[in-house]
Image (cartoon, rainbow, N blue to C red):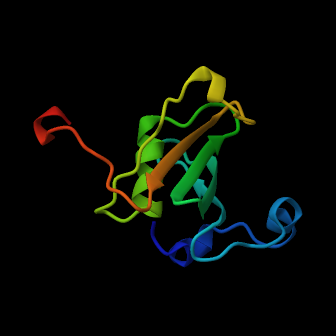
Amino acid sequence: MRDLHELDRFRVRGHKAHNPWGWDGDGSCGAFTMPSPVDGAIMAIIASTGEGWDHVSVSRKNRVPNWQEMEFVKRRFFRDEETAMQLHVPAADHISVHPNVLHLWRPQAVEIPLPPKAFV
């Protein structure tokens, strides 16, 4: 993941960050708001690292983020040479607390296997 201080102009600070999380975050985690590249509406973004994973969640108030928005967020939170993924886990493992959120994941210790370039 990038050094998230690069995105400090989008970082949620003060009581809006302190109430749910207790602090503003640092270079590896935090809450952010960014305008959608599609319609300019605010996207709420939470980035974190832990247990060997980088994680970024993206939500919109009235709908699920679309591909263009997820790609926009991926390019800002992860380095160009990093692969991040969305996972479709078994239904029994769903614990979503927000109906309009999608997640990006990247394991820190291993490379994500990729299909042949001709397939992508």
Residue at 58%, 76% in the rendered image? 27
Q: Is residue 76 left or right of residue 28?
A: left
Which quadrant of the figure has residue 31?
Answer: bottom right
Between 23 and 107, the one nearer to me in the picture: 107
Q: Residue at x 53, y 42 (%)?
A: 39
- Please state the horizontal and vertical placement of residue 46, each as a whole percent of the image: 64, 56
* Outermost left residue: 118
Locate residue 52, reporting x and y percent.
Answer: 52, 60
Q: Nearer the viewer, residue 104 or 65?
A: 104
Quadrant where the N terminus is found in the figure: bottom left
- Residue 63, position in %: x, y? 63, 31
**Where, by quadrant of the figure, is residue 107 drawn?**
bottom left
Q: Which residue is pictured at 36% across the width and 65% down the height?
A: 79
Image quarter hosting the C terminus: top left
**In the picture provided, is 46 more to the left or to the right than 5?**
right
Give how far across and how far down residue 93 sits, in percent. Answer: 63, 29
- The residue furthest top is 91
Q: Is residue 58 above or below residue 94?
A: below
Residue at image location 28% in from the left, 62% down from the top? 81
